[in-house]
Amino acid sequence: MEQYGQWMWKDGAWIEPTDANTSIMTHAIHYGSGFFEGIRAYHTEEGPAIFRLREHLERLVRSCAYYHVTLPYTVDELEQATMELIERNGFEACYIRPFVFLGTPWQALMPTAETKVHVAISCWPLGEYFNKTVGIRAKVASYRRVSSTMMPMQAKAASNYMNSQLLKGEALRDGFDEAIALDMNGNVSEASVANIFLVKGKTITTPSLDCSVLDGITRQTVMQLAREAGYEIVERHIGRDELYVADEIFLTGTAAEVTSVIEVDHISIGGGVQTVATEMLTRYREAVTGQLPEHRDWITFVKSAVTE
C-alpha cells in the first residue's frame, strides 16, 4: 500500500496501512454509516500548504451531526493529526481523507449507545483528476440527484455517493468524462463529485442549494474569487436547456479544482472557449498555494507537526 504512504492515523494511534483492519460486522459496511472529507495539501516553498483545513474538518463534524453521530475528537485534535500525518509520510503535496465510521456493536438497523465511532485519516499523492488543458466532455445523466427531502445533502455521507457512482459510471460507459445530474424537479444540480457553474458574459451562475447541491468549499472559494475579479455571481434554478447555450461551463471541487466542460450531450459549449475557467483556475491555484496575501488565512502550513 505504498500509494497511501507509510502511516495512517486511526483512533488516535499511528499505524501502517496494512494494519488498518476493520471487522466485517462493522455497521458502516452493512448500512453505509460513514462520513468523510476530501482535502488537499499543495507544494509551496514554505512547506506543504493545506487548503481550508479547518473549514473541511468543521464540515465533517456537521456531516456527522446530521446523523446524530458525535466525534470523539475535537477539530483542533484532528488538525494536529492531519499535519503530523503529512509530515510523517514526507509528502510535499497530497490528497487527505478524514473518515468517520460506525463500528460495533449494533442492533438490527440502528447503532446503539455502545457502537464505537471510529475516526481515521489517510493521505496519498494525487495527480490531475481531469485533463484541464483540453477540458472534459459531459452528459446529462438519466439518474437524478437525491433530494434533500430524502437525505441531508449537505452531509458528506458515504451513502450519498452511491448516487454519484451511478452518475459517473453511466457517463463513462457512454464515452463521456463526467455526468451532470438534474434534481428531482428537472433543474441542473451538480456533477458526480463537483459543483457546476455556467458563464454568460460577466455573469457566472450556479445552482442554488435547494437543487440538491452540496455547498462545496471549493464552490465557496471560487465564488468569492470571481466576485473579487469583477464577475456577478448568481445562485438560482438552472434549466437543462441553459447548459447548451452557455458561453462556458466549469466544475469545481477539491479534486477537480476548476475544470472546463467543453461539451455536453455532444453539443460544443461556446466553441470550446475556456477563458473564464482558466482565469478562475489561475486565481484558485494562487489561493491554494498562499500567493494571495488577502487569503493567507485559508492556508495551514505543515511545519514541525510531529509530536513524540
Image (cartoon, rainbow, N blue to C red):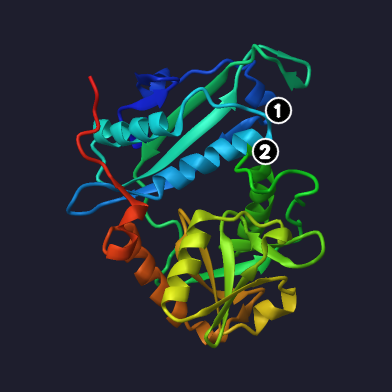
Secondary structure type for disc 1: helix
Residue 200, horizontal then vertical, whole percent: 58, 85
Q: Is residue 245 left or right of residue 11?
A: right
Q: Quadrant of the N terminus?
A: top left
The answer to which of marks 2 and 1 sits earlier in the sequence is: 1
Which residue lies under the disc numbered 2?
159
Is 124 in front, or is 295? 295
Residue 100 position by quadrant: top right
Which residue lies under the disc numbered 1?
31
On residue 94, the disc is none
Secondary structure type for disc 2: helix
Q: Quadrant of the C terminus?
A: top left
The structure residue drawn at horizontal position 25% and vertical position 52%, both measured from the top left corner, is: 43
Query: In this rendering, is residue 269 above or below 290?
Result: below
Circles 2 and 1: CB atoms closer than 8 Å: yes
Residue 286, horizontal then vertical, whole percent: 31, 65
